Image: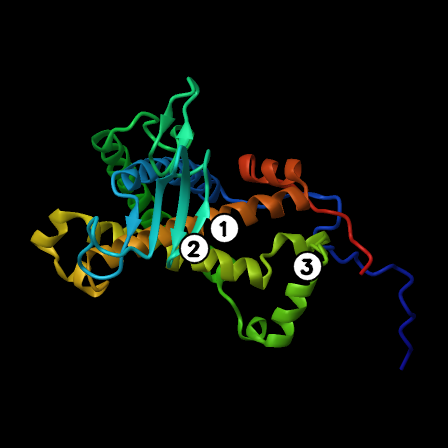
Amino acid sequence: MSEIAPSTESPPPVEAGPQAGDLVKRHRLSTRIWHWANAVTLLIMLMSGLMIFNAHARLYWGEYGANFDTPWLKIGSARIGTYEYGYLQVAGHRIETTGLLGYWNDPDGTPHRRAFPYWATIPSNYSLADARTWHLAFAWVLSLGLAAYLVWSLVNRHLQRDIHIRRGEWRMRHLWQEVKDHARLRLPSGAAALRYNTLQKIAYAGVLFGLLPLMILTGLALSPGTDAWLPLVTEVFGGRQTARSIHFLCAFSLVAFFVIHIAMVVLAGPFNELRSMVTGWYRLPKERNR
């Protein structure tokens, strides 16, 4: 039997995945549209919600709450002699906030005794009716947009592929390593930057399946009309005032998420991150020495 001579041809090249420096597609059109629509919607809802809060700048637990009841949170103003000041009071502890909360001046120098200043509210002049109109109109945008995004993300498997947290990612050793990497600003690089790390997945899942649905449900519980067709919503939260407090806490949890999100965008490279959320294209960052 004759021996087969060894081939002198080189093996076919193996296709390499995306490398550091490559421009790759990162975000789908549906994700980008929902991201920007949601950003505008939440900003308008927050600012109109602050104007609604100005009508009664106190928060309570339970079913009832009025001026003579003890709130767990209060924003107001007080006077000591001729000195008037604004304050934030939480669980009986008072912090002076003159010029920012409770007591502030408008551009003309006129003092106002309202919780949140004109630049933080919609409308900027006090109007509870207009604030409710803005708030309820964009509540529909938020609710329908969230429902459509979740359904479409199930269809294109975005949730299963990018948000689903796998068993190995829940290990304390893995989570602690990611916490240390973030604390040292060792952000993912190369192809790893295309995948959400576990901390990102937890944050995004918490917003999508926790904060936003809870905002919508507590918002319904605050509506007197809900009592007519679904009083159970208010009862589940233990009363309208509890629902109002949870609604407020969820709103500022979203503000905290936004601040952290922007900080991470700046640290990761704002131009590259912004381009990926506008056009979908993202340049993989260079590998870092660990």
Residue visible at 46% across and 41% down in the picture: 97
Q: Is residue 234 above or below residue 74?
A: below
Q: Residue furthest front?
A: 81
Q: Position of residue 235 (x, y in %)?
A: 17, 63
Who is closer to the viewer here, 62 or 204? 62
Out of 162 and 174, give the one closest to the viewer: 174
Disc number for residue 257: 1
Q: Is residue 75 left or right of residue 237?
A: right
Q: 108 or 199: which is nearer to us?
A: 108
Labels 1 and 2 touching (C-beta < 8 A): yes
Residue at x-position 44% and y-position 39%: 39
Element carrying mark 2: helix
Q: Please state which amino acid type lies under the numbered disc 1.
A: Phe
Q: Residue under circle 2?
A: 207
Q: Which is nearer the N-term, disc 2 or disc 3? A: 3
Callout 3 amino acid:
Ala
Point out the frontmost of discs 1 and 2: 1
Q: How is the image coloured?
A: rainbow
